[in-house]
Image: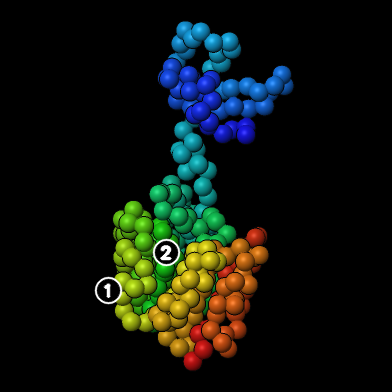
């Protein structure tokens, strides 16, 4: 398979033993070829040719290429950008890090749009699978009385807390899930950017955490799998679907 690193290949094994920092096998014009990267040219007893390539800091290039994202009244911007705000807009500063959520992915934008369309003033919001913390921070920006995020990935919680501090946000973050003992009993809004299958598994727990008449905002759902989430909803619930590309957000008011 082109591009695969097969360490059982004798050629690749030898290249790595000689100090290659990366290698792959590709389909060349004359048949299979092996491309290997070395930090410097070495006297190798192998058939081939040396070529110099410029070093590229791909992380830096990605970061510098990020632009601000506008969703409703929110402007999600990396700290090296200085977007001009229109009347009524609020900025959420967010740099790429090890946690998912910068506002550039369709699923995140769907959730931000759904939160923006709600009147969150005086309401409580729980973000399940908070990642970078963007949704809880956005809810705080949009006037929520409280915004709390939980994530089972311990590495994301410090990232979310740092983003909250960067934005002087009151949003709080805990390691764990819907059964965390420190969670308030219920919330007015529960938002989650996870997979369809995970939403199905967590549906009963979601419903235990939402007040009657409250809202569930479930994104991260591929359009072809949205029926799984809809079937898991409680009887009488009428979902509203938001689409962007191949992704769907399922929004529902929990029956009273």
Neighbours of disc 2 within 10 Å: few (<14), some (14-19), many (20+): many
In this rendered view, identify the residue nearer to me: 212 or 114. 212
Q: How far apart are marks 1 and 2 (CA)?
A: 16 Å
Name which quarter of the figure residue 40 lies in.
top left
Are discs 1 and 2 less than 8 Å apart at CB? no
Residue at left offset 31%, top offset 79%: 184
Q: Which of marks 1 and 2 is nearer the N terminus?
A: 2
Residue 138 pos. (x, y %)? 43, 67
- Check disc 1: other Cα within 10 Å, few if <14, some if 14-19, many if 20+: few
**Quadrant position of residue 143:** bottom left
- Residue most extreme to the left: 182
Percent across and percent down for residue 238 are 60, 84
The percent position of residue 190, horizontal first and vertical second, equals 44, 75
The front one of 247 and 228 is 228
Q: What element carries label 2?
A: loop
Q: Which residue is the site of mark 2?
A: 129
- In the current view of this chain or complex, which residue is farthest to the right? 29
> For this view, does 256 lie left or right of residue 160?
right
Tell me if residue 9 comes above or below residue 170 in the rendering.
above
- Point 52% across, 21% down: residue: 10
User: From this viewpoint, is residue 17 visible?
Assistant: yes
Q: Is residue 238 above or below residue 70?
A: below
Residue that numbered label 1 is attached to: 182
Q: Which residue is drawn at 48% across and 76% down?
A: 203
Numbered disc total: 2
Q: SS class of the residue under badge 1?
A: loop
Q: In this view, does 4 lie above or below 209?
A: above
């Amino acid at each position: 398979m082109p591009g695969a690193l097969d360490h059982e290949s004798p050629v690749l094994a030898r290249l790595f033993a000689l100090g290659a920092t990366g290698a792959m096998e590709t389909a060349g014009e004359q048949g299979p070829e092996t491309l290997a990267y070395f930090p410097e040219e070495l006297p190798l007893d192998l058939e081939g040719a040396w070529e110099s390539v410029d070093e590229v800091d791909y992380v830096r290039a990605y970061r510098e290429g990020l632009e601000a994202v506008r969703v409703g009244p929110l402007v999600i911007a990396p700290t090296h950008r200085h977007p001009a705000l229109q009347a009524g807009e609020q900025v959420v500063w967010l740099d790429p890090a090890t946690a998912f959520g910068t506002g550039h992915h369709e699923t995140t934008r769907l959730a931000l749009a759904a939160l923006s369309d709600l009147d969150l003033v005086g309401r409580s919001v729980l973000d399940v699978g908070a990642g970078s913390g963007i949704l809880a921070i956005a809810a705080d920006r949009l006037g929520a009385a409280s915004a709390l995020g939980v994530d089972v990935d311990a590495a994301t919680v410090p990232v979310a807390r740092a983003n909250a501090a960067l934005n002087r946000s009151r949003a709080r973050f805990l390691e764990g899930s819907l059964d965390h003992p420190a969670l308030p009993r219920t919330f007015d809004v529960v938002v989650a950017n996870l997979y369809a299958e995970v939403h199905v598994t967590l549906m009963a727990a979601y419903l235990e955490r939402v007040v009657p008449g409250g809202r569930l905002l479930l994104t991260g759902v591929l359009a072809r799998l949205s029926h799984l989430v809809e079937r898991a909803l409680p009887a009488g619930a009428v979902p509203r679907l938001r689409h962007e590309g191949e992704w769907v957000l399922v929004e529902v008011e929990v029956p009273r």
